[in-house]
Amino acid sequence: MFLIASYPRSGNHLVRFCIEYVTGRPTLGHCRNPNDLPIHLNGFADAPGILNHVGGKPIAHKLHNLGELKRIQEKYQIDGIILIKRDIMEAILANTNKRVKGRKIRDLKRQISNYIELESYYTDIDLPKVCIHYENLVSQDADVYQLELDKLLQFLGPQAVSQHFEKLRKDFTALRQINANPTKREWLGKRSQGSDYWRRNTSWHRRMLVKLLIWWKSSQLMPQEMK
């Protein structure tokens, strides 16, 4: 079982879609949320049946914070980790609509801690691992996003079916749009209020987040490669 680790709003759903598409095996969602379904069960109005070939034993499990890790390890042997990394400012701003409660600095600190803890876990773990960069994956430049897809293929190895992967590389822009419009996604309807919305409407959070990140980068709490 692979872990797909990411701070929320960092492309976890897209990477899970790619993995299910190329391996034909489901990925598991949040361990305490029964509505966080394997991607192939979400349904896609733009392309019914796009993941009909998916089934069998799960190949990977979503992980948004280390509090979920023990529960996953009680059920599965962890064979490797896929980290999806998004710019820390963009990720936290995109996620504050659900996570930050009012003007509380401690809530922003907690979000930074959650982000950094996942990166530290990835850095320290002695298992096969790969880091996928969100900004590259959603790029409009085929040369850029195909490099990320190739990294994912190499990591998955023989579990990736070659014909599915070649189709993913060829039609990735269209498949990326299909993934963005499922019919049963748990937070469907909330996704439009992303980082641009929160820049305009939570300027206080943005100013505080900048100050906290400046302080955090100067401390020993942030992994060296993030400085």
Image (cartoon, helix red, strand yellow):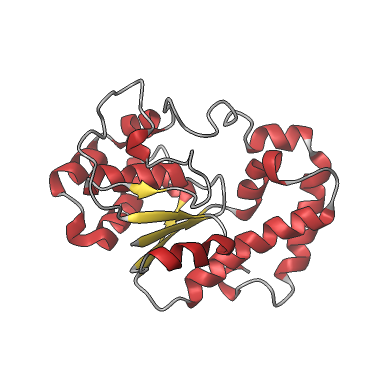
State the image coordinates of residue 216 (x, y, percent, origin top left).
73, 67
- Residue at screen point 77% across, 33% down: 201
State the image coordinates of residue 6 (x, y, percent, origin top left).
51, 55
Compared to residue 98, the image places residue 227 above or below, namely below
In the rendered image, the residue lying farthest to the top is 45
Figure quadrant of the N terminus:
bottom left
Figure quadrant of the C terminus:
bottom right
State the image coordinates of residue 26 (x, y, percent, origin top left).
30, 46
The one nearer the camera, 61 or 166, is 61
Q: Quadrant of residue 38?
A: top left
**Residue 84 can be seen in this image:** no
**Image check: 220 left or right of 190?**
right
- Residue at screen point 21% across, 45% down: 165
- Residue at screen point 41% across, 42% down: 14
**Image check: 143 left or right of 221?**
left
The one nearer the camera, 171 or 158, is 158
Compared to residue 68, the image places residue 95 above or below, namely above
Q: Quadrant of residue 159?
A: bottom left
The one nearer the camera, 85 or 37, is 37
Q: Quadrant of residue 17?
A: top left
- Residue at screen point 44% across, 48% down: 29
**Image check: 132 left or right of 191?**
left
State the image coordinates of residue 181 (x, y, percent, origin top left).
43, 27
Compared to residue 94, the image places residue 73 above or below, namely below
